[in-house]
Image: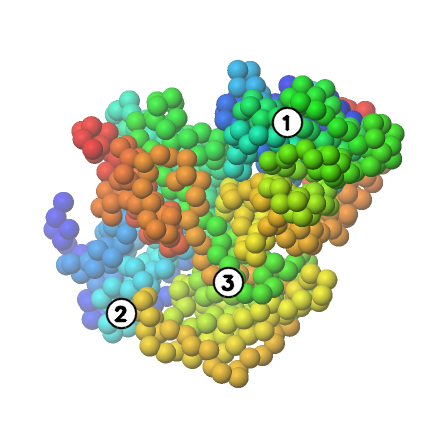
Amino acid sequence: MFKIIHAQFLAPGIKRFVIEAPRIASKQQPGQFVILRIYEEGERIPVTIENSDPVKGTINIVVQSAGKTTHLLNTLETGDSILDVVGPLGKPSEIRNYGTVVVVGGGVGTAMAYPTAAALKRAGNRVISIVGARNKELVILEREMRNVSDALLITTDDGSYADKGFVTDKLKQLIQNGTRIDLVVAVGPIVMMKAVSELTRRENIHTVVSLNPIMIDGTGMCGGCRVLIDGKSEFACVDGPEFDGHKVNFEVLVQRNAMYRDAEQRSMDEFRARTKSAAGAPISGNTGQKWGTPVPQGEAR
Amino acid sequence: MSPTATKSKNPLLPKERIKVPRQSMPEQPAEVRAHNFEEVNLGFSPELAQQEALRCLECAKPTCTDNCPVGIDVKDFVQKIVIGDFLGAAAKVREANVLPAITGRVCPQEDQCEGKCLLSKKVKPLGIGYLERFVADYEQRMGTNIIPHAEPTGKKVAVVGSGPSGLTVAGDLIQKGHKVCVFEALHEIGGVLVYGIPEFRLPKQIVREQIDYMRKMGVEFETDVVVGRTVTIDELLEKEGYDAVFIGTGAGLPQFMNIPGEHLNGVYSANEFLTRINLMKAYKFPVYDEPMLDLHGKDVAVIGGGNTALDAIRSALRLGARKAYVIYRRSETEMPARAEEAHHARQEGIDFQMLTAPVEFLSDGKGWLTGARCVRMELGEPDASGRRRPVPIQGSEFELPLSVAVIAIGTSANPIVQSTTPGLETNKRGYIQASEETQRTSRKGVFAGGDIVTGSATVILAMGAGRRAANSIHEYLTTGVW
């Protein structure tokens, strides 16, 4: 059991948890993630590590409500526990002095981009960060990103905050202004990473993206997270999650991530029905006895 | 101990023993079990066990024991069954084997003990696996007696991975008086025994009972630890005070065929398919959250001829598949699966497409699998493995409609421990190099065994390596000599 020391919404549907996990905290490096399982009947899902404190023995994870498990996770509060948290998984980001690096964070991907931006800054790079979100409320970690960037550019899809547009508009501007860019790191929705990679391919700028395929064990056993890189199968959990954006087959990633859409929808519908009809009843598909996590008291339920 | 000092307790003369037929294992009828996940084999009654035990010829030089990777004293434990001392028989088995209820179910006995049984020269071999299973289950029902430990040595050993080799090392070392902690990456203990082998062949309850037994013996377990990531081998040795480490991380990433269409939705690796079913209980969705594709009324094929392939396709059948094919490029004779599994699979209605290989997976144009284009093969000259090489027959291509294909053609080495442990030597395939006698690696105090050394093999071979490693770790810890 992994105890939640602190839980706080950063934006609607996006929550940060500080979790007691001393072993993971002492090892976490930028670019890595954890896999967690909330309760006995739960699925295993990969989750972003935003930060860690090796002295306190805690890690910060940031979760956006998408399907049942993330919705359920975001009902947990300070003092609740998560049954399993394993990591840090994946290869760390390759941190060295490249020169000028543009770090692009889209939506909740900003949480994964943040530690990489911070490490790149510490390694002596000039870091220009671009953070994009759908609207003002969904812009996260602005202060944190500003602290580790030489410049921070923000876009919102609807123009409700900063500049209206997409992260690629800002990247395009930088390129057009003649900014010398040695590396682009992009973390966010697949469409965003694909658009960034297409843009930088034309400009011949090396681009690293962090992929988020369906994953089960996350330790190099099941092969569920296979992605097509330069026409070859690679595994996001041990070969990634970061890959050369110019070599990634994004269409296959989108297609494979949609494999369980029907089941995910069904899970979500049942979760919604249950949380509406019986506040306080366990959300697990089974009886309360098997529910491995203290039933949260949050207002979301 | 002199093996033949005591007079035989068997009332039958050797020539009479040969006339006793091999007792059949009671099993669930094929048409019933094809629709459930309950165990196929039901186990011997005491009467059946004693009847079978009578067949043992009590050879002066028991080749069965010689051919057992952990060296079980077969003759002795079978004799104890003859006289009805079932707990004594179980204790005898446990001297060599910490997981008898598991090996009694999953060992390829025809390649090990039973393959060398003298009876098999004239009649069917002694049912050693069935008898081993019987005594282990009997002991479990009666309440297991914990084997007393040696005096505590004050030494501490870390075991990486809780599969067959790791559990064997842990069980052996705890009895020798060492402290043992087993680290497991997944949330459940047992490795391939829980994520790989299905319920109908090895009930998870059996695995849990064996693990509970080991906990009672004093073995500690820590789940959710990926050694190499969560903690390194060096940290275990230097910071956490372990005197030795055993690496038993098992088979690694699944291999694919690199044919067109392998990334289509509906194409699984066997590891993923079985992990979803066995570990994550996806077949109980939505009670359990992990999903899998609905197989009811669908046509499913597995590619490969090993135990994993048969486990996957028999699971698919139980999950409602309309047609369930095994596609294997050689003939049934060359299939590496246990003979009993192939026999059971046929009884259940699995369609064996032997001497056949897929060359392409076909798509509906929207990213979903619709079938496989296959080619028939014939066997040519023997290849490096000594088996006759399959050669495609010109013009034999045909299309097989499929909704799901499961690829079970083997695995390659998991790189995590090797890439995070400086000085740990690997072979060119990425597996850890370890001495065949002592299981020592190139790093002082670090031992390795099982699939991470040999590549995919069997539970009992991994346990054999675990046993050798435990002896050699014990020697290292007591003498300090590397």
In the rendered image, the vertical position of residue B250 relative to residue B24, given as above or below: above
Q: Tag 1, which secondary structure?
A: strand
> Relative to residue A296, is residue B192 depicted above or below?
below
Q: Chain of mark 3?
A: B
Of B324 and A24, nearer the camera is A24
Q: Which residue is mark 1?
A: A127
- Return the x and y of residue A269 as percentages of the image width and height: 80, 44
Element type at mark 2: helix
At 48% across and 56% down in the image, what residue appears? B255
Residue wearing tag 3: B257
The image quarter in which residue A108 lies = top right
- The reply, left or right, for residue B102 in relation to residue B370 is left
Please tell me if label 3 and label 1 are on a single chain. no
Q: What amino acid is labelled 1 in the image?
A: Val
Which mark lies nearer to you, 3 or 1?
1
Picture residue at 60% right of the left edge, 67% below the top: B361
- Residue A50, percent across and down? 63, 27
Amino acid type indicated by mark 3 = Met
User: Residue B362 sits in which quadrant?
Assistant: bottom right
